[in-house]
Image (cartoon, grey):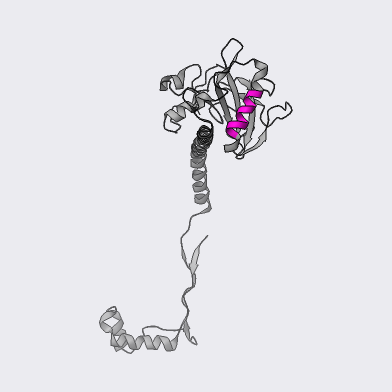
């Protein structure tokens, strides 16, 4: 494509006016022009019958050829293909950290508000419970309704309804091991917040068949949407009556353990791989570092 511009034609009268200006400003013009004027010769000559000087109206700038344009576009495409995955991944990481921190803050503030009403968490009725499996659901439901619901915008409850697939579905460890999100029949209470985050609570199992004490909180930042994987959209927290607060699971471990232990944020074959990913993010000042197995 060329970039052209037009130059208007000049009439003979305007040319004559220009020649008179030349006579008055001879010092400002090329040396051969005054001699033409002294000899009575016109500076400009027209062909017989002509009244205007027709200047070229097709003075064009040079432009890229089609081949050059295609090559340039090809280079841009290659560069974009190389950089886009990295840009997308960085955006997803920042979005994940922002949502995780926000969810953690909402749950933390709810527990702080509940303690202002009911006193220190260590004195709450659930603390020190020694429950049988069939008692856990009612206890967890009561915990949610009494301590959390007044301070969190909950749009849907899932506990007690085994047909509800919004909260109960399969998720995966960092190593790809498929895990169930639980069922509403034993030791689980789940609900969905108004931003779509699914929250699941379950009591700690001491290994003897008794439940109570700490409450594990498992959150899925985008609900049932993929990838439903620990460390990507699924993160674990724990409510500890001894500390009277909620913490990311794994806090208190060294960074080496948060990253490389059996429950660490890694891709080993353990069914627990990735449970410490949230703890690692919090440990790293709410940032996903380069060694995080994204």
Residue in front for this viewpoint, 219 or 94: 219
Q: Is residue 145 magenta?
A: yes
**Residue at position x 53%, y 53% in the image:** 66
Residue 255 in view, yes or no: yes
Residue 121 located left or right of residue 44? right
Decide whether the magenta segment is chiefly helix, strand or loop.
helix
Nearest the camera: 56 or 21? 21
Question: Can you name the residue that lies furthest to the right here?
Answer: 163
Q: Which corner quadrant of the image does residue 190 belong to?
A: top right
Q: Residue sitting at 33 percent across and 86 percent down?
A: 21
Is residue 91 a member of the stretch shown in magenta? no
* Residue drawn at x 41%, y 20% as measured from the top left: 256
Q: Position of residue 233 (x, y in %)?
A: 56, 31
From the viewer's perspective, is residue 170 above or below residue 96? above
In this rendering, position of residue 262 left or right of residue 27: right
| x then y, percent, for residue 56 | 47, 73
Q: Is residue 86 visible?
A: no
Total marks placed: 0
What residue span does the magenta drawing correspond to?
138-148
Say which of 47 and 13 sits in front: 13
Tell which of 46 and 250 is nearer to you: 250
The answer to whether residue 108 is left or right of residue 134 is: left
Residue lying farthest to the top in this orientation = 208
Residue 47, x across and y down, in percent: 46, 84
Q: Quadrant for residue 195, please give it.
A: top right
| Residue ID at (70%, 21%) | 185
Residue 41 at what x, y percent from top left?
A: 35, 87
């Amino acid at each position: 494509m060329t970039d052209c511009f037009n130059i208007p034609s000049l009439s003979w009268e305007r040319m004559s006016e220009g020649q008179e200006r030349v006579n008055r400003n001879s010092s400002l013009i090329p040396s051969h022009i005054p001699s033409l004027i002294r000899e009575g010769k016109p500076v400009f000559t027209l062909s017989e019958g002509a009244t205007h000087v027709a200047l070229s109206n097709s003075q064009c700038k040079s432009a890229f050829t089609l081949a050059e344009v295609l090559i340039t576009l090809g280079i841009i495409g290659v560069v974009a293909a190389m950089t886009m995955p990295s840009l997308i991944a960085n955006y997803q990481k920042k979005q994940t950290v922002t949502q995780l921190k926000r969810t953690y803050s909402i749950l933390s503030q709810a527990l702080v508000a509940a303690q202002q009403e009911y006193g220190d968490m260590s004195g709450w009725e659930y603390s020190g419970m020694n429950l049988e499996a069939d008692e856990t659901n009612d206890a967890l439901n009561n915990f949610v309704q009494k301590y959390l619901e007044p301070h969190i915008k909950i749009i849907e409850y899932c506990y007690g309804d085994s047909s509800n697939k919004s909260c109960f579905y399969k998720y995966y460890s960092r190593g790809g091991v498929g895990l169930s999100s639980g069922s509403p029949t034993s030791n689980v209470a789940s609900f969905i917040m108004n931003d779509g985050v699914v929250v699941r609570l379950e009591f700690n199992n001491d290994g003897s068949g008794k439940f109570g004490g700490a409450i594990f909180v498992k959150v899925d930042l985008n609900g049932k949407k993929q990838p439903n994987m620990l460390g990507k959209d699924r993160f674990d927290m724990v409510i500890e009556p001894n500390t009277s607060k909620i913490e990311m699971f794994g806090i208190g471990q060294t960074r080496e353990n948060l990253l490389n232990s059996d429950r660490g944020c890694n891709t080993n074959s353990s069914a627990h791989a990735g449970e410490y990913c949230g703890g690692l993010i919090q440990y790293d000042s709410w940032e996903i570092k380069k060694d995080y197995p994204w």
